[in-house]
Image: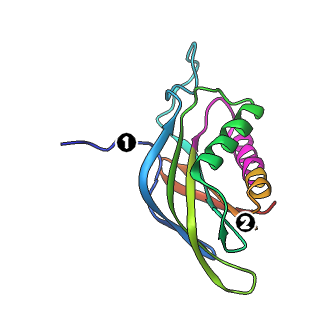
Amino acid sequence: MTTMPSYPANLGATHFPGGGFHPKGSVYKHGDGRAELGAIKFRSQEAIAARIFVGFNVGGTPCWTIENLIDLVMRMRLLQGANPSATLLAQKGIYQHTTGSRQVVIEDGAQVIIFMGGTSLAAFTDEMIALATEIASVLQQELVIVEIQRNGVTQETIGVTP
């Protein structure tokens, strides 16, 4: 019997204002899971993570892949000073949202889960908003969703534009 890996974050289906995301397929894991190495000054049982949702269509046409998204996120996280071995999870799925004209759009997309390490919650949230802004700009998206979780429970959902 194969067991699913356990992550201190919720990777399941979710709904947010104007849309939702339904995971579909395998979870891609990048990094060795050791976001913070060296002498431990403090350890908490609490896990803070950001879950970012994005669609892959531009104007109704599929344009992007999960590989494009992972490459962009990895580049941006390095520019933000993140540890290159920090764990990042990504998963394809169905991204649903409502346009400004109230049209419901259902398209392929993905979620990316990034775990906080070595920074404050406020700084981490700011980094995730900046990352989502860059994702929206580069992937030509009208809206990217950032969900901040504490131990897998949503604390805040933020809609980010380019």
Name the residue nearer the viewer: 15 or 89: 89
Q: Please state which of the two labelled residues, at mark 1 or mark 2, is closer to the viewer.
A: 2
Horizontal and vertical percent for residue 97? 62, 74
The amino acid type found where label 2 is placed reads Leu
**Could you say which quadrant of the image residue 73 lies in?**
top right
How many numbered marks appear?
Answer: 2
Q: Earlier in the sequence, mark 1 or mark 2?
A: 1
Horizontal and vertical percent for residue 160? 75, 61
User: What colour-coding does the image apply?
Assistant: rainbow
Residue at the location (58% across, 26% down)?
85
Residue at the location (56% across, 43% down)?
48
Q: Which residue is mark 2?
A: 143
User: Which residue in the rendered view is the most extreme toward the left?
Assistant: 1
Horizontal and vertical percent for residue 71? 65, 41
Asked if residue 117 lies in the magenta stretch, the reply is yes
Horizontal and vertical percent for residue 99? 71, 79
Question: Disc 1 versus disc 2: distance between alpha carbons?
Answer: 29 Å
The amino acid type found where label 1 is placed reads Ser
Which span is picked out in magenta? 114-132
Image quarter where the C terminus lies is: bottom right
User: Which residue in the rendered view is the most extreme toward the top?
Assistant: 39
Query: Could you classify mark 2 by the number of other residues whose Cα lies within 10 Å: few (under 14), some (14-19), or many (20 or more)?
Result: many
Q: Answer with left or right where residue 117 lies relative to residue 81.
A: left
| Vertical comparison of 115 with 41: above or below | below
Q: Answer with left or right where residue 143 lies relative to residue 108.
A: right
Residue at the location (61% across, 38% down)?
116
Name the residue nearer the viewer: 104 or 35: 104
SS type, badge 2:
loop
Asked if residue 85 lies in the magenta stretch, the reply is no
Image quarter where the N terminus lies is: top left
